[in-house]
């Protein structure tokens, strides 16, 4: 339990750092962005928008920095992330409609990618030196392609040229969203290509890491023992793999941030209605309250996912539990 | 230092070749470009021809020139970010690993926090607040990218430093009375070189990705030619849907190629650090020639000596 408690306190500190960075950044920036922003929006700006901008940058409040900070934290605790400048609605409600899409898309692809990568990595490690090794350079190439570029190419080849997959959006415009079969089927159909893109881009990391650990693990005595006992090969591989997977699981919590970073852009390519798409629109429109809200929500979600990964590690590795008992 | 023999496997050679090619391109690219990449003097949307190897953009700019000129900006940012991030990670990692105690707790916390915050959203947030002037400055962008990219290296270097800290030669240096700074710089740092090299390669790889992504999103100055801005313009002119592959595929492939090159070189370093991987990566031909079992035997992954392997490879090729 001690390990989990340590990780939890790390995530609390990280969340606090993210919140504080979010608070300080707009206040540290040179120049007067408010005037620029108001200048850009001339003729179409409402008093509420001016107020939203002032709140975001902490200008015109006649408050000390500390008072602003505590006020900011208080509003955050109440779930108030400010008001979007361009959409004129609360950031929290804008985000509430976008977050489920992203969590669904990235969650499914990360789990798929981890499982596929680990399984294939275990086999690659076991059959090292065989023809299977030729997979490695190919996987490395896919890992080096930016997510959004691979997405564009996939969209072009399998979407608009071959018409194997539907393109653009998260579900068919002809079905109404809801908990019924037609909608869910459409959801899966439209999700296929983005998921394949993210899996292709991220699978190599898991695969290569697992292969390397597997090769190191095979040299251990317990594997030799398992073979000497006459266990079937399938069981020996599973036996070694369970031990080799631990570093991958330990890395899982760190890799989630990287995968999320890449996957956010896949949303842009496929016009998926998630947080990534929203973030880029917010950046283009210079909608600072929205940008900040999105950054915070992404960070907190990634931290929650990290904690889940740590729990998984805790379950898989009995040593973390006995350490607590000592 | 004489033990620094990086394995000369085909993977590493191919990787080094690719990286060298792009390094040369960084230097000479802008001089080789046949036209001014920003000049809009040509017909728009030309398909590839002998005059325009990769056709022209919707504004009538020569795409091949953009690709050649863009190599420099892309690589400069990547190198600035990679070097700064690696310096940061060495400082933090070695100090944390060697000094231990409270320093370690504090520095580890710092790097773990940076690891846990997703990098790209943080980059986008910081960059969106930058004044437009700074967005066109490669060094500013490189520095910001390095801020989000140093933590992984620091973690790896800390672990390696900790394993070195209690070795006999460090103990001996301590007994002789060498200063802490000297022990860290002269005794420990050289032994970190392979890990350091691998961390540098990875940070450069990360920085290329981060920079290109920022440019693709439109967060760097669109007047500076790099492979990301090329993709940005291609995307905003709907080149992918108009099937203008010659516009958006070349920059993407260049990014992927250089990334592959760096990763392949990294395999070599991995194999150098972990000799078991080295033996596992040998082809059947080399294996036979060097008297190793054709299939790696269970429970006994032979550790091949690099020199023996190198000579054997040479003989194997002659056959």
Image (cartoon, coloured by chain):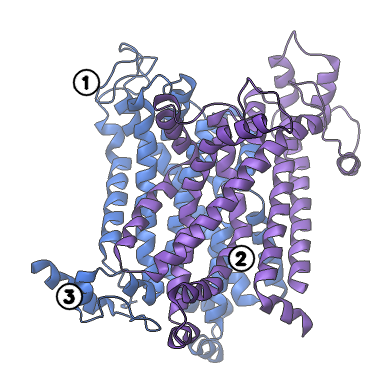
Chain colours: A purple, B blue
Q: Is residue B7 left or right of residue B112?
A: left
Whether residue B189 appears in this view of the structure is no
For image coordinates 51% across by 61% down, the residue present is A118
Measured as percent of width and height from the top left, residue B193 is found at: 43, 69
- Local packing at callout 1 (Cα closer than 10 Å; few below 14, some 14-19, many 20+) is few
Q: Are marks 3 and 2 in contact (CB under 8 Å)?
A: no
Q: Is residue A54 left or right of residue A193?
A: right
Q: Is disc 3 in the same subunit as disc 2?
A: no
Tell which circle, 1 or 3, labels the residue nearer the N-terminal end. Answer: 1
Location of residue B319 (image quadrant): bottom left
Measured as percent of width and height from the top left, residue A186 is found at: 61, 31
Whether residue B78 appears in this view of the structure is yes
Query: Which one is nearer the viewer's eye here, B55 or A186?
Result: A186
Pointer 3 chain: B
For image coordinates 54% across by 89% down, the residue present is B171
Q: Mark 3 falls on what kind of element? A: helix
Pointer 2 chain: A
Q: Is residue A88 left or right of residue A77?
A: left
- Local packing at callout 2 (Cα closer than 10 Å; few below 14, some 14-19, many 20+) is some
Q: Is residue B294 left or right of residue A10?
A: left
Location of residue A1 (image quadrant): bottom right
Identify the residue under disc 2.
Answer: A250
Q: Residue furthest left?
A: B319
Q: Mark 1 falls on what kind of element? A: loop
Which disc, if any, is residue B49?
Answer: 1
Q: Are marks 1 and 3 in contact (CB under 8 Å)?
A: no
Identify the residue under disc 3.
Answer: B312
């Amino acid at each position: 339990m001690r390990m989990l408690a340590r990780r939890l306190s790390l995530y609390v500190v990280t969340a606090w750092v993210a919140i504080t960075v979010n608070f300080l950044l707009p206040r540290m920036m040179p120049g007067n962005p408010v005037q620029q922003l108001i200048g850009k929006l001339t003729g179409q700006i409402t008093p509420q928008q001016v107020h939203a901008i002032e709140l975001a940058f902490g200008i015109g409040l006649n408050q000390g920095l500390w008072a602003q900070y505590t006020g900011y934290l208080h509003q955050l605790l109440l779930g108030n992330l400010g008001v979007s400048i361009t959409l004129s609605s609360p950031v929290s409600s804008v985000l509430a409609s976008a977050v489920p899409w992203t969590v669904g898309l990235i969650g499914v692809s990360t789990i798929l990618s981890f499982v596929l990568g680990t399984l294939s990595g275990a086999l690659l490690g076991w059959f090292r030196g065989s023809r299977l090794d030729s997979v490695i350079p190919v996987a490395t190439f896919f890992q080096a392609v930016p997510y959004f570029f691979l997405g564009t190419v996939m969209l072009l080849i399998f979407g608009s040229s071959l018409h194997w997959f539907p393109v653009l959006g998260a579900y068919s415009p002809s079905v109404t969203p809801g908990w019924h079969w037609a909608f869910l089927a459409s959801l899966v159909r439209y999700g296929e290509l983005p998921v394949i893109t993210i899996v292709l881009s991220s699978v190599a990391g898991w695969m290569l890491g697992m292969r390397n650990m597997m090769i190191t693990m095979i040299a251990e005595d317990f594997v030799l023992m398992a073979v000497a006992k006459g266990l079937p090969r399938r069981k020996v591989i599973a036996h070694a793999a369970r031990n080799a997977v631990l570093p991958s699981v330990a890395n899982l919590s760190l890799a989630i941030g990287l995968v999320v970073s890449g996957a956010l852009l896949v949303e842009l390519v496929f016009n998926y209605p998630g947080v990534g798409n929203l973030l880029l629109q917010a950046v283009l429109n210079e909608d600072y309250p929205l940008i900040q809200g999105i950054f915070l929500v992404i960070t907190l979600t990634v931290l929650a996912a990290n904690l889940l990964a740590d729990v998984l590690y805790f379950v898989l590795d009995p040593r973390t539990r006995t350490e607590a008992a000592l | 230092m004489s033990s620094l023999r990086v394995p000369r496997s085909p993977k590493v050679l191919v990787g080094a070749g690719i990286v060298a090619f792009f390094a040369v391109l960084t230097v000479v690219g802008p001089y080789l470009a046949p036209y001014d990449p920003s000049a809009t003097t040509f017909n728009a949307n030309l398909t590839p021809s002998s005059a325009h190897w990769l056709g022209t953009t919707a504004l009538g700019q020569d795409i091949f020139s953009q690709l050649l000129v863009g190599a420099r900006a892309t690589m400069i940012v990547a190198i600035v970010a990679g070097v700064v991030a690696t310096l940061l990670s060495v400082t933090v990692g070695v100090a944390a690993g060697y000094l231990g105690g409270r320093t370690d707790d504090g520095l580890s916390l710092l790097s773990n926090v940076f690891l846990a915050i997703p990098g790209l959203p943080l980059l986008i947030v910081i960059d969106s607040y930058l004044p437009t002037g700074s967005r066109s400055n490669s060094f500013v962008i490189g520095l910001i990218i390095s801020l989000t990219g140093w933590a992984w290296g620091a973690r790896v270097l800390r672990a390696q430093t900790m394993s070195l800290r209690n070795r006999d030669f460090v103990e001996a240096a301590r007994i002789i009375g060498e200063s802490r700074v000297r022990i860290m710089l002269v005794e420990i740092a050289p032994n970190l070189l392979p890990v350091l090299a691998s961390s540098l390669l990875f940070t450069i790889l990360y920085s290329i990705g981060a920079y290109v992504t920022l440019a693709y999103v439109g967060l760097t100055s669109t007047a500076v030619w790099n492979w990301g801005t090329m993709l940005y313009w291609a995307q905003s002119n709907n080149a992918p849907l108009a099937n203008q592959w010659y516009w958006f595929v070349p920059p993407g492939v260049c990014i992927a190629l250089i990334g592959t090159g760096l990763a392949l070189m990294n395999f070599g370093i991995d194999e150098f650090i972990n000799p078991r991987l080295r033996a596992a990566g040998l082809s059947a031909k080399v294996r036979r020639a060097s008297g190793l079992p054709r299939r790696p035997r269970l429970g006994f992954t032979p550790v091949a000596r690099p020199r023996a392997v190198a000579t054997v490879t040479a003989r194997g090729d002659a056959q």
